[in-house]
Amino acid sequence: MIRHVTALAALILLASCGEPADKVQNAPPMAARENVLHRGNGAEVESLDPALADTSWEQWVIGDMMMGLYTEAAESKAIFGAAENASVSPDGKTWRFTLREHSWSDGSPVTAEDFVYAWRRTLDPKTASKYGAILYAFKNARAVMEGKLPPTALGVRTEGEHTLLLELEHPAPYLPELLAHNITYPVPRHVIEAKGAAWTQPGNYVSNGPYVLAERVANDHITLKKNPRFYDAANVRIEQVVFYPTEDAAAALKRFRAGELDTQNPFPADQVDWLRANLPGAIRQTPTLAIDYVVFNEKRKPFDDVRVREALDLAFDRDTLTNRIYRLGEKPAYNIVPPGIANYPGGAELPFRITPYAERVQRAQALMRGAGYGAEHHLRTTYATSAQGDARRAAVAMQAMWKAIYVDLEIVQSETQVNYTKLREGDFDIGAGSWAADFSDASNFLMLMTTGNAQNYARYSSPAFDALFTKADAEVDTEKRGALLKRAEQIALDDHVWITRNFRANRTIVQPYVKGWIANARDVNRTRWLSLEQRD
């Protein structure tokens, strides 16, 4: 079985979905052009509303326009943004922020009330925010989002125009990172109430950050221009930034080589050897706080049966997929929380990590037979994944791995945003997911398994898991809190909620004339900190 999968890996490597890079002519550098940065952005942006966005490629665009109480430095560390200072009560549960005097791009002043309005709006059930659950550290946030309390019950209030008080349910050491995330950005109430949902359109969009929305053409590009009213505009060196939805990473690489793109995320995995040999200086890779995974829809049979989920997990050869097919230096994942997460001991793990793969397949076959499947009765099911070529290669490998345990897998590819809509709506059997940390804390990953969470694509519900997660939230002692979250992670692993595939690394390429780009674990590089050298 191991030899079979290894041979398959070699075939997939040869049968790349895109044209090999060495068959494309290197284009000479383009002549110097206007001070405009062209960024390949991975996928189509669905929403520019901070309350509604829920993907990295949306956050990369919105984060160039909007700014929370904190923002990201060049290396992604949280630094003061709209706030100029903060103080914390001894128990860690009350934060007082003083806002710097600055304005929206239309000249209106940004006030503490803009944050109160934004957070209440996000948690209001009528807004239907997919991401509001990460604000549950705010006092009464869960009850507000569940409709049990009105938005005015949220633990936030103002003391004058430039002072904001935030009360928490429990101490949150990760709060500065959370308050740099788009879900916590202020929004312009005066524009939203005048324009409604159309407030995010060019000409209506009002921002408080380095850039403002200039143009948006669906499935083509989003153009931002420098905001002259940004409080630090004098140090913003790039005049415009254009984001392109680059679903086809192989085509994006060709555009990068032709000088049409200055940065691209991601680059195609099957071209990594060519890039290392020919454009080593362009690759910006470092481990990130992110995971790729495969999720089961537990509301559909037979995925409500843990025997089936365990069998598929056992037969999934993550080592071959990561080390022989992708070969990006990423680590196979045998747990959920990535290494390097702050204040977390680690140690939760799938028990079969050191079991030889052949033995795992035998165990998986036995589990499938116990669930009613076998050589004469295969499980016929579907796998929902994105339309990217790399996703296709992974799916083909999975087909071969699971064939040995009586599974016939149909691959269903969609555009990335469409695929995530299927996951959110439960319109799938098995699906491809990924998660990048919003802040460095284990809870940001484990919340994806809590009952009722909008990002809980599995529809998993475990009273034992939920109880540990809730208890950890209330625990002040860092070591005790980490131990509780570790126990919760082990429960989710034992229940095989996900197939944990690999811990991710940056897959970005950057032209040599783009200066200031720092690869980092958060995979966040704001245009504000970048500059362009003159090109020949």
Image: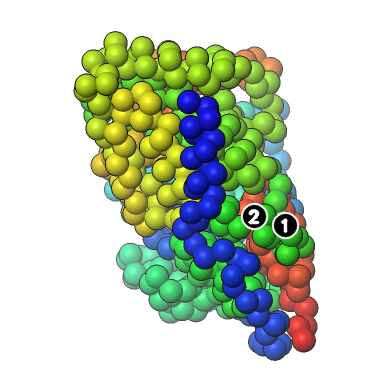
- Relative to the observer, which residue lies in front, 499 or 379? 379
- Relative to the observer, which residue lies in front, 273 or 152? 273
Q: CA distance from mark 1 to mark 2?
A: 6 Å
User: Of the numbered discs in the image, which one, if any, rests on residue 276?
Assistant: 1
- Residue 453 in the image: x percent, y percent? 38, 34
**The quadrant where residue 83 appears:** bottom right
Amino acid of disc 2: Val
Residue drawn at x 34%, y 54% is 414
Q: Quadrant of the C terminus?
A: bottom right
User: Of the numbered discs in the image, which one, if any, rests on residue 365?
Assistant: none
In this view, 412 is above or below 341: below
Q: Is residue 420 visible?
A: no
479 on left or right of 408: right
Total numbered labels: 2
Amino acid of disc 1: Arg
- Residue 102 in the image: x percent, y percent? 64, 67
Q: Secondary structure at mark 2?
A: helix
Q: Secondary structure at mark 1?
A: helix
- Residue 197 in the image: x percent, y percent? 33, 65
In this view, 282 is above or below 254: above
Q: Is residue 90 visible?
A: yes
User: Of the numbered discs in the image, which one, if any, rests on residue 272?
Assistant: 2
- Relative to the observer, which residue lies in front, 27 or 200? 27
> Mark 1–mark 2 contact, CB under 8 Å?
yes
Mark 1, residues whose alpha carbon is within 10 Å: few (<14), some, or many (≥20)? few
